[in-house]
Amino acid sequence: MIPYGRQNINQADIDAVVKVLQSEFITQGPVVPAFEKVVASYCSALHAVAVNSATSALHIACLALGVCKGDIVWTTPITFVASANCALYCGAMVDFVDIDPKTYNLSVERLEEKLVKAEKAGTLPKVVIPVHLCGQPCDMEGINSLSKYYGFKIIEDASHAIGGRYKDEPIGNCRYSDITIFSFHPVKIITTGEGGMTLTNNKQLAKSMRLLRSHGITTDPADMHPRPEGEFWNYQQINLGYNYRMTDIQAALGLSQMQRLNDFVSKRHTIAKQYNQMLSALPVVQPWQHPDSYSSFHLYVIRLKLDEINKTHREVYEMLRAAGVLVNLHYIPVYRQPYYEQMGFCAGYCAEAEQYYSEAISLPMYPGLSELQQDYVVTVIENALNGQDNHD
Ligand SMILES: *Cc1c(COP(=O)(O)O)cnc(C)c1O
């Protein structure tokens, strides 16, 4: 079985985790801030707040930006559900902006059209959440300039994209956004088991997210509310927060993985180049790369040219899975999920996203994928696309 993605753990990673297990602190101790510092410095961001998942990171990022009931948050339909759910957690509504046909990221043209209409209708979004799909950055300059005119905030969902670059600068530097979030789930670029992080250059937002990560509790006397004379308080809850803390065990793994981040990403580029060559004669569209971007290549997505293939999308998908190549779909448009359909979204809402989804397949892509395995993947695809028609 060849999965579409998997973690890469070496002895140094294991040793780093064992060291924490033998230490004084196994929940949030000294390693969490050390991990935050290394990620912030890698990304050239001023502040980083580590949490237990990217889903939690999205939630506290929305809360820190003041998202609440009555607000609207926009994102792309081609993403994991968490990019949209975070707005619902805050009581806000979600809407979707169709994708760019080449990068599959949120389209800046569609965004602008939708903003023009929303301004007239008085339904402008409070926050827009672009997602760097597959690790390829969105057109952040375009989104940022629209944010200045229309007054919305930006959270970059960079769950796929640590180690990637936009216009020769690291994704995560928040040059074009208020907050960037990363995921450290095992299929992502680096892992902490489960884990995530928020980055920002805004001190207030960082402080607010730090509070939200741990019950809204502060131990800083400067933030405490005055109490009656003679009462002694060593901590106060001043906001409604959550238990979204990362443990030192996780942070130790993340810190160790950071040392191989650049190697991981360059290995992913090598694999992508190989795929590009090996698949060039087949009826598939390869992942197009914008010249401004250096993708982290979390995913390698091909689109089937179905009019040149005598099989359906589903048949190809099932043939590959049956041969032990565990391809995946990234993603079914979020608004097509039954939960979202119940909110009133219908098939056909974002035409480009639905076209993409009806043809897309994510191939195995991770640093440990061997040349032999990659040859096998390509052979299985060749057989599936050129092989005998299975129809009666
Ligand atoms: C994986 C992922 C998330 C959620 O990450 P978790 O760390 O599993 O919570 C959010 N957004 C996108 C785009 C993702 O791929």
Image (tube, grey):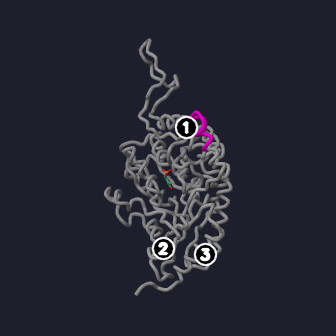
21 inside magenta stretch:
yes
Amino acid of disc 3:
Leu
> Which residue does the image show at 52% across and 60% down from the upper left?
105
Amino acid of disc 1:
Ile
Mark 1 Cβ inside 8 Å of ligand 1: no
- Please state which of residues 150 and 53 is positioned toward the viewer in this rendering: 53
Which region of the structure is painted magenta?
17-31
Q: Earlier in the sequence, mark 3 or mark 1?
A: 1
> Which residue does the image show at 54% across and 83% down from the upper left?
386
Question: Quadrant of residue 48 in the image?
Answer: top right
Read off the residue under disc 3: 279
Read off the residue under disc 1: 26
Residue 354 against residue 55 in the figure, above or below: below
Read off the residue under disc 2: 322
Give residue 322's position: percent from left, percent from top: 48, 73
Residue 324 against residue 145 in the figure, above or below: below
Residue 161 against residue 240 in the figure, above or below: below
Rounded to the nearest angstrom, the CA distance separating label 2 from label 1 is: 42 Å
The residue lying furthest to the top in this view is 230
- Rendered image: mark on residue 163: none
Circle 3: element type:
loop
